[in-house]
Amino acid sequence: MVIDKKEHIINVAIDLFAEKGFEGTSIRDLAGKAEVNVAMINYYFGSKEKLFEYMVEFKSTYIRERLEEITNNEQTSDIEKIDAIIEHYVHRFITNHKYHRVLHQELLLLQREKIHAAIIKTFSKNTAFIKAIIENGIKNKVFRKVDPEFTIITIIGTINQAMLSKSMCSLMLGENEDYDLYTDDKFSKRIIKHLKQLIHAHLLIEQ
């Protein structure tokens, strides 16, 4: 797969932001590791802050396209759509765990208003699809009258909590310290199964 220069720079930036933090990463560090010159980064993005904002929008596009596809699939029920979203989010978080760690750090720090606003704006666009599915299920009397926003927080928050700290997750799951949840297929299947059971019990009205 051919990766263009902008995507390559973004991928390198994610690695550096995850390792050294936003403040600890300079444009010169980024240029060196990406094997491009500083002028190219400035040409593409203008600043480190703008690079971060572009990174958020670029990465979120993949999720948004899949969420739109799931939402618009008329051949599946609302609960099947929720199941598909759970599977998608788990796989995306696993394959992009460094990126999600970077986002989480920025949301907690609240040091850069524009970056924080960009993350929230993107998050709101994506979660709107999930909210629409839940509200449709409630309208059709398939789902209970639940709180859609907190249902979304439950799904994404559970995935986040499990994956942001490998050591904590390993401890909770009774695994060794060197356990790598990001490469263990059993882990992804386990968390998907758990979330589906949890959300089905939370949403579905007994027939």
Image (cartoon, rainbow, N blue to C red):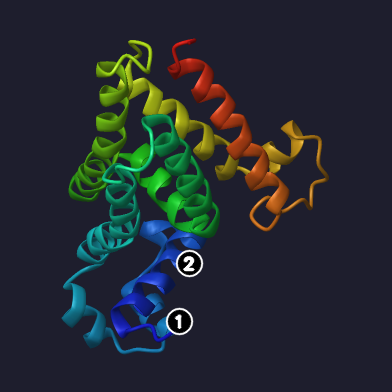
Query: Which corner quadrant holds the N terminus?
Result: bottom left
> Which amino acid is tagged 1?
Lys
Q: Secondary structure at mark 2?
A: helix
> As rendered, which of 123 and 136 lies closer to the eye?
136
Closest to the observer, 65 or 114 = 65
Say what secondary structure mark 1 lies in. helix
Residue 121 against residue 137 in the figure, above or below:
below
The tally of labels here is 2
Residue 136 at what x, y percent from top left?
Answer: 26, 25
Q: Which mark is on residue 15?
A: 2
Q: Are marks 1 and 2 in contact (CB under 8 Å)?
A: yes
| Residue at x-position 43% and y-position 61% | 17
Query: In which quarter of the view is residue 110 placed?
Result: top left
- In terms of depth relative to the viewer, which is nearer, 117 or 68? 68
**Relative to residue 203, is residue 47 drawn left or right?**
left
Q: CA gap, disc 1 to disc 2? A: 10 Å
